[in-house]
Image (tube, rainbow, N blue to C red):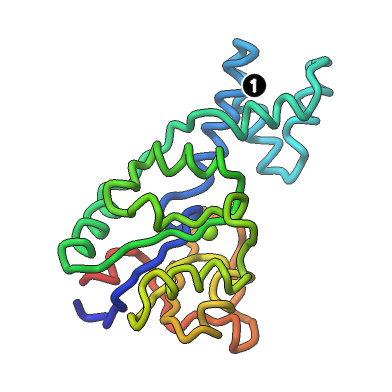
Amino acid sequence: MTLSLSDIIVFDLDDTLYKEVSFVKSGFNAVAQHFNASGYATELFDAWKNGENAFQHLRSKYSLPTPIEELLEIYRNHIPTIQLDINIASVLNSLVANGKTLGLITDGRSVTQRNKIKALGLTRWIAVDNIVISEEFGSSKPDIRNYEYFMSKYPSKSYSYIGDNTAKDFIAPNSLGWQTICLKDNGKNIHSQSFDIVQEYRPDIMISSLAEIIY
Ligand SMILES: [Mg+2]
C-alpha cells in the first residue's frame, strides 16, 4: 500500500461506498410500483433533479389522494435494488486481506440504512457491531461520539475515516487525531462538496477513486 493507512478503517456509506442517486432511483421505482405505474418513476426522478418536492409534484400532477407521508414511508422502507461496484468490493477484500478492521459511520434512519447495507452485502467485510447508524446510536455526524465508539472498542490503534461530505464528515475525526480521506465527487453526488472551508473541516487526503487507498 502506497498510502499509509490506519489499523481501523471506517467508511461513510452514502456517496462513499455506493452512489446515493442509485438509491433515490430505486426508491422512486418502488413508489411507481405501488401505483402500478412505471412512468411515475421518471416523473419523480425528473422533479427531484429539478429540486422540486418529487412526491408533492406527483400528487398534484395525477391528483393522487395518497398522503405524502405514505409515499415517504414506501421510499424509506423499500428494499433497494442497489449494488456494490466490483471495484469497491475488491478494495474491501484487499483491506481485510491486509489485516485492516473495517467499520461504518452513517447518518440516517435505521431501516433505510440497514436495507442499503444488506443490499450491498457489506457485512461480508464489516462486522455488524462495527456499524454505527445515527438513528440507532443516538447522535449524528459530526458528533465525536460516533467516532469515539471505535476508539473505545479498539483502543491504542490508528484510525482512518473515509467519506465525501465536507460539511460534516471530517471535523470530528480530525479533532480526534484520525487520518481523514475524502472521495472526490465525480459529478454524481447528492451533496455538493466545498473545499473552501476552514482547516478543521478539511480532509488530510483527497482521492478520486477508493482504489487509490490500496494501490
Ligand atoms: Mg456520504
Q: Which residue in the structure is indicated by mark 1?
A: 40
**In front here: 62 or 126?**
126
Quadrant for residue 56, please give it: top right
**In front here: 38 or 34?**
34
Quadrant containing the C terminus is bottom left
- Report x, y in % for residue 107: 58, 55
SS type, badge 1: helix
- Report x, y in % for residue 153: 40, 69
Left/right of residue 67 with respect to residue 203 in the rendered view: right
**In front here: 79 or 128?**
128
Quadrant containing the N terminus is bottom left
Residue that extends furthest to the bottom in the rendered view of this protein: 199
Residue type at numbered disc 1:
Tyr
- Report the residue at 57% width, 43% height from top: 110
- Report the residue at 21% width, 61% height from top: 96
- Report the residue at 43% width, 31% height from top: 81
